[in-house]
Image (tube, rainbow, N blue to C red):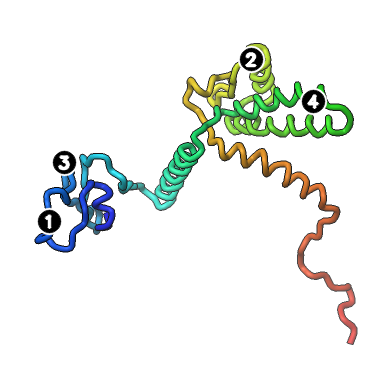
Amino acid sequence: MLPMRLPLACGGQAVNSVDDLDLDDLGYADLVYEQSLEDDKFTFIEGVKNPHSCTVLIQGSTDHAIAQMKDAIKDGLRATQNCVEDEAIVPGAGAFEIAAHVHLEQFKRTVEGKPRLGVEIFAKALLVVPKTLLENSGLDVQDKLLRVLADRENKHRVVGVSVASGDPIDPAIEGIYDNFLVKKQMLGLAPVLAEQLLLVDEVIRAGKSMKSDGGMQG
């Protein structure tokens, strides 16, 4: 742990000399010890009060396993940061997309003309998320999805899909949530990307240069 992080972890204040040390400058920790891990020595500080800094020790059998754990920790920290900054979360397990799909299916009845087709397509596109969850779990996508949609429409409650069985679940009871910011960006970015793709009228594929059968005539 870097010296500047010690005050954040223990609650003390850094001083230039022990001569300037005062009782108010001291931090608190239940235990401080040094331990060797392979060829390196680490100082562990445990039992601190109200820490504002910490170190996560990761150990694994391979570099790949360690990298996966690092990514999981970073993703968790980012999700937590987004939750704190947004002060909001949405039900996970595909519940948001299912609810939005059902709402758009009802809304399209009030729309006339070609825009109605756009609403219908957008509603179907939202089901990609629960479909992917079911497909990655090796379940019957169509059968399970129809059951979940029927449960949502009949009981008028928040419902997601279980990756274990594919049955309808209440994400709040299961503790499954998504970041509000992620869903907001998804809804804002998806139409923009779709519009840009529709503007593409020609695709040029790069490849090896081709010469005539006879080659260049000298």
In the image, residue 57 above or below residue 118: below
Q: Which of marks 1 and 2 is nearer the N terminus?
A: 1
Q: What residue type is labelled 2?
A: His
Closer mark to the observer between disc 1 and disc 4: 1
Label 2 Cα crowd, 10 Å radius (few <14 / some 14-19 / many 20+): few
Instruction: Give the answer, above or below, for where 196 lies relative to 217.
Output: above
What residue do we see at 56% from left, 35% from top? 180
In the image, 216: left or right of 72? right
Check disc 1 and report its element: helix, strand or loop: loop
| Distance (Cα) linking label 3 and label 2 | 52 Å
Q: Which amino acid does label 1 sit on?
A: Leu
Q: What element carries label 3?
A: loop
Q: Residue at x 40, y 49 (%)?
A: 66
- Say left or right for 22 vs 87: left
Q: Residue 30 carries which label?
A: 3
Q: Do the residues labelled 3 and 2 touch (CB within 8 Å)?
A: no
Q: Earlier in the sequence, mark 4 or mark 3?
A: 3
Three-letter amino acid code of the residue under disc 3: Asp
In the image, residue 156 lies at what x, y percent? 64, 15
Residue identified by numbered label 4: 108
What residue is rendered at 63% in x and 12% in y? 155
Identify the mark nearer the N-term, 1 or 4: 1
Q: Are marks 1 and 3 in contact (CB under 8 Å)?
A: no
Q: Looking at the image, which is closer to me, 42 or 30?
A: 30
Say what secondary structure mark 4 lies in: helix
Q: Pick whichever, 116 or 208, lies toward us.
A: 116
Residue 172 place in picture, x, y as percent: 50, 23
Q: Which residue occupies the foreground of this view, 109 or 46? A: 109
What numbered label is drawn on residue 157? none
Q: Name the residue under label 1.
A: 21
